[in-house]
Image (cartoon, grey):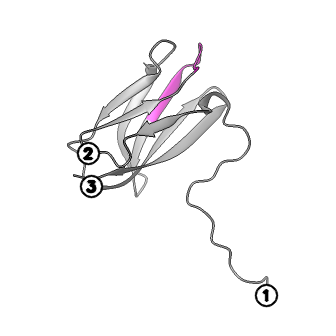
Amino acid sequence: SGGPLVELPVFTSVGDLGIFTGTSVWPNPADQELNVMVPGLGDVQVEGELLDATGRLVRSFGAGALVRGNDRLVIGTSDLRQGSYSFRLRGADSSVVLPVNIVH
C-alpha cells in the first residue's frame, strides 16, 4: 500500500538559499564558542535563533546582530548542555537552518 518508507534527511532545503548562500558555522562540534558567518549580507537585516533538539529557543539574536560589515556572529556555548542544536537564520525572503553540536 504505497511501497516502502523512504528515510529523509533531518535538514532539507528547497530552492535557492538566497542571501544565506555560503553561510557557515564553525567549529562544529563546538565547545566554548560557535562562529556563524553570513557573507555578502548587503543591507539585509537578519535574525538568528539557537534552538535545542526539542525546538525550544535557547538564544535569540536580533536584526542588528548580523549586518553589512559585521557578517560574523560569535556565540558563547560554554554554558550550554552537550547535545544537538539548530541555528536558524531569517531575513528578507530567505531562511536557513543549520545543524550544530555542542560538546564539552
Q: Position of residue 48 (x, y in %)?
A: 46, 33
Residue 76 is inside the magenta segment: no
Residue range (magenta): 40-48
Spatial separation of the CA atoms under disc 1 and disc 2 = 47 Å
Task: Please state which amino acid type lies under the numbered disc 1.
Answer: Ser
Task: Please state which amino acid type lies under the numbered disc 3.
Answer: Gln
Element at label 1: loop
- Disc assigned to residue 36: none
Q: Which residue is mark 3?
A: 82
Q: Earlier in the sequence, mark 1 or mark 2?
A: 1
Identity of the residue drawn at 43% across and 32% down: 36
Establish if 18 lies above or below 102. Answer: above
1 vs 2, front mark: 2
Q: Position of residue 96 (x, y in %)?
A: 57, 40
Identity of the residue drawn at 63% across and 66% down: 8
1 vs 3, front mark: 3
Do callouts 1 and 2 mark residues in contact (Cβ within 8 Å)?
Answer: no
Q: Residues within 10 Å of mark 1 (few under 14, many from 20)?
A: few
Q: Earlier in the sequence, mark 1 or mark 3?
A: 1
Element at label 2: loop
Task: Please state which amino acid type lies under the numbered disc 2.
Answer: Asp
2 vs 3, front mark: 2
Instruction: Report the magenta stretch's main SS.
Output: loop
Q: Quadrant of residue 35?
A: top left
Q: Is residue 23 left or right of residue 81?
A: right
Q: Residues within 10 Å of mark 2 (few under 14, many from 20)?
A: some
Q: Quadrant of residue 77?
A: top left
- Disc assigned to residue 31: 2
Q: Which residue is mark 1?
A: 1
Q: Is residue 16 left or right of residue 61?
A: right
